[in-house]
Image (tube, rainbow, N blue to C red):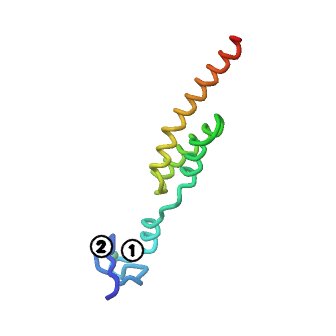
């Protein structure tokens, strides 16, 4: 038994090799490629790794990359939105801690 597709525009059942709906002329290849496109969110991956492992500037870069990753996930259907969100949460915490420890370290240094 062949796969049966349903035309998203007119709802007719279609043969799976059809590129255009014979009933309404809807271009199924465009619809299919849009629905199946789940690009790997390289921004989220690189941003998260930088946020987790980097020093101050790398964490800052990771924060920006994760923000881009969220934007890409929302607008262009990229995957790994959760990872990008995690990076956006982790990065400011790390930046804050780095600043605090730097101030503490400098305070200790100058008090000696
Ligand atoms: Zn149709």
The outermost residue toward the front is 112
User: Does label 1 point to a residue whose CB lies under 8 Å from ligand 1?
Assistant: yes
Quadrant of the snapshot with the C terminus: top right
Where 47 sits versus 10, above or below?
above
Classify residue 63 by image quadrant.
top right
Report the quarter where the N terminus lies: bottom left
- Which corner quadrant of the image does residue 55 belong to? top right
Q: Which residue is mark 2?
A: 10
Q: Are there few (<14), some (14-19), or many (20+) residues within 10 Å of tag 2? A: few
Locate residue 91, reporting x and y percent. 54, 37
| Crowd around label 1: few <14 · some 14–19 · many ≥20 (10 Å) | some
Mark 2 touches mark 1? (CB < 8 Å): yes
Q: How many marks?
A: 2
Q: Nearer the viewer, residue 1 or 55?
A: 55
**Image position, residue 41 (x, y; %):** 53, 55
The residue closer to the viewer here, 54 or 5, is 54
Q: Position of residue 106 (x, y in %)?
A: 67, 19
Q: Give whichever of discs 2 and 1 has the lower sequence position.
A: 2
- Residue drawn 62% across the image and 19% down it: 104
Give the image quarter of residue 10: bottom left
Find disc 1 in the rendering and name its residue.
26
Residue 97 — which label?
Answer: none
Q: Secondary structure at mark 1?
A: loop
Quadrant of ligand 1 in image: bottom left
Q: Is mark 2 within 8 Å of ligand 1?
A: yes
The answer to whether 111 appears left or right of 3 in the picture is right
> Please, is residue 55 above or below residue 27 in the view?
above
What is the C-alpha distance between the residues marked 2 and 1? Answer: 8 Å
State the SS at label 2: loop
Give the farthest residue toward the top: 111
For image coordinates 37% across by 79% down, the residue present is 21
Q: Nearer the viewer, residue 31 or 38?
A: 38
């Amino acid at each position: 038994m062949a796969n049966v597709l349903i035309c998203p525009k007119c709802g007719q059942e279609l043969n799976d090799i059809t590129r255009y709906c014979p009933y309404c002329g809807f271009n199924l290849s465009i619809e299919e490629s849009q629905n199946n496109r789940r690009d790997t969110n390289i921004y989220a991956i690189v941003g998260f790794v930088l946020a987790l492992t980097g020093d101050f500037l790398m964490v800052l870069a990771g924060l920006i990359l994760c923000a881009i990753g969220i934007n890409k996930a929302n607008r262009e259907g990229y995957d790994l939105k959760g990872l990008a969100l995690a990076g956006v949460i982790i990065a400011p915490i790390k930046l804050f801690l780095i600043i605090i420890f730097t101030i503490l370290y400098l305070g200790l240094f100058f008090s000696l």
